[in-house]
Amino acid sequence: MFRIKKLTPELIDTFVKFFDGLSFDHEPHWKTCYCNFFQSNDTTEEWIKRSGESNKLASIRNIYEGMMTGFLAFEDEKCIGWVNANDVKYYIRLENELKDYVKGKKVALTVCYVIHPDYRNQGVARKLLAHAMDYFKYEGYQGMIALPSENSVKKELHYHGTMNMYLEQDYKEVGSFHNVKIMYKKFI
């Protein structure tokens, strides 16, 4: 059985060790991201030049400041998965693409799932999504946005979650950009 914990400053070491322990053989440049990409407003060229160490430090700073949070999945004491989930306002890189869907609303976003290879296809991402939905609904959010990739054949590129995950939870498609669908789940 999987347990899920909200990422807090007390779990930073667990978060970092989880990312450091993954090989990312399928997409080696992801090894240096530390799930910081969408919280960064660097241009693509600037982002490519960033080091893993600078991204790790930025993520740590953002966790302490509350700008980066999400949920970690555990089997016993082993961290086996992660979803980057927070108020949409903290995803600076997506501001222009999402502004029409969040006007005047308190909306959360799940943007990246990272599941340990030994635990993929076992429902970990779905459990992380369900937990995030419960959490943000309890916190008074009006809804959540998800950004699954359109028509991705490579399973590894489903790091935003799959369309089926969101359709199972009654998310509705409300738009798209750059080969990404914008899905919305209304709470109230």
Image (spheres, grey):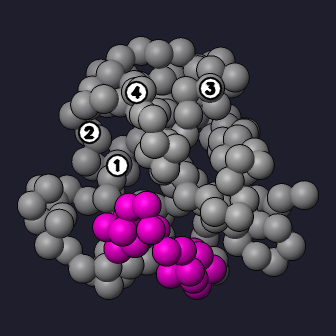
Residue 85 drawn at (x, y percent)? 53, 50
Kind of residue sitting beneath label 4? Glu
Give the residue at the far right of this rendering: 1
Residue 178 drawn at (x, y percent)? 25, 31
Mark 1–mark 2 distance (CA, rounded to whole Å): 7 Å
Q: Nearer the viewer, mark 4 or mark 1?
A: 4
Mark found first going from the N terminus, 3 or 4: 4
Secondary structure under the numbered disc 4 in the rendered image: loop
For the magenta stretch, what is the residue range?
13-34
Q: Which mark is residue 21?
A: none
In this orientation, which residue lies closer to the viewer: 162 or 90?
162
Dots 1 and 3: beta carbons under 8 Å? Answer: no
Mark found first going from the N terminus, 1 or 3: 1
Kind of residue sitting beneath label 2? Glu
Q: Is residue 88 above or below residue 156?
A: above
Q: Which mark is residue 150?
A: 4
Q: Quadrant of residue 126?
A: top right
Mark found first going from the N terminus, 2 or 4: 2
Residue 20 drawn at (x, y percent)? 50, 81
